[in-house]
Amino acid sequence: MVMGTVVRQPALRTTATGMVVGGFSVMTTRSWDSASSSQKYEKTYHRIVCWDGLATFCHQALSEQMRVYVEGRLSTRKYIDKEGQEKMITEIVASEVIPLSEQKVEAMAAMDVLEAMS
């Protein structure tokens, strides 16, 4: 499970077999005190994949900068990029998505300012 901020608007598409699939990205942040007594921050971005009704729900209910709870399983797959290189990607295949707020998260901008100062 992850709890974070939606950073990419949920998108929908239909597979060749007619299944609806959606995807979006969530940013999580952790902070800690460094040895020099300054607070450090680390952002991690997670790709989320949703299928069928959950994909439609996310497309309609979520927007950028909303707080969200996502539960699911990790899935790693290979694909060939535009340059013909094989790549691997790990995604969270969501089984549950719960919007936690409808307001944009202003704390993201404040955190960017703090990071720039350190």
Image (spheres, rainbow, N blue to C red):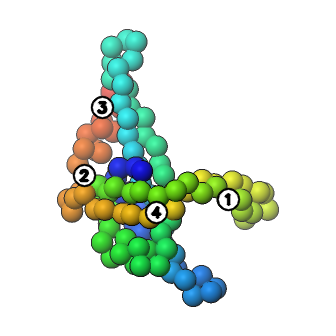
Q: Residue at x 47, y 69 (%)?
A: 50
Checking the image for residue 94, the label placed there is 4
Name the element at disc 4: strand
Report the residue marked by disc 2.
Answer: 105
Name the element at disc 3: helix
Q: Nearer the viewer, residue 44 or 19?
A: 19
Amino acid at the residue labelled 3 = Leu
Residues at marks 3 and 1, CA–CA distance in whole angstroms? 36 Å
Labels 2, 4: front one: 4
Name the element at disc 2: loop
Q: Is residue 33 left or right of residue 73?
A: left
Report the residue marked by disc 3.
Answer: 114
Q: Nearer the viewer, residue 82 or 33?
A: 33
Residues at marks 4 and 3, CA–CA distance in whole angstroms? 32 Å
Report the residue marked by disc 1.
Answer: 77
Q: Residue at x 77, y 57 (%)?
A: 86
Residues at marks 1 and 2, CA–CA distance in whole angstroms? 31 Å
Labels 1, 2: front one: 1
Labels 3, 2: front one: 2
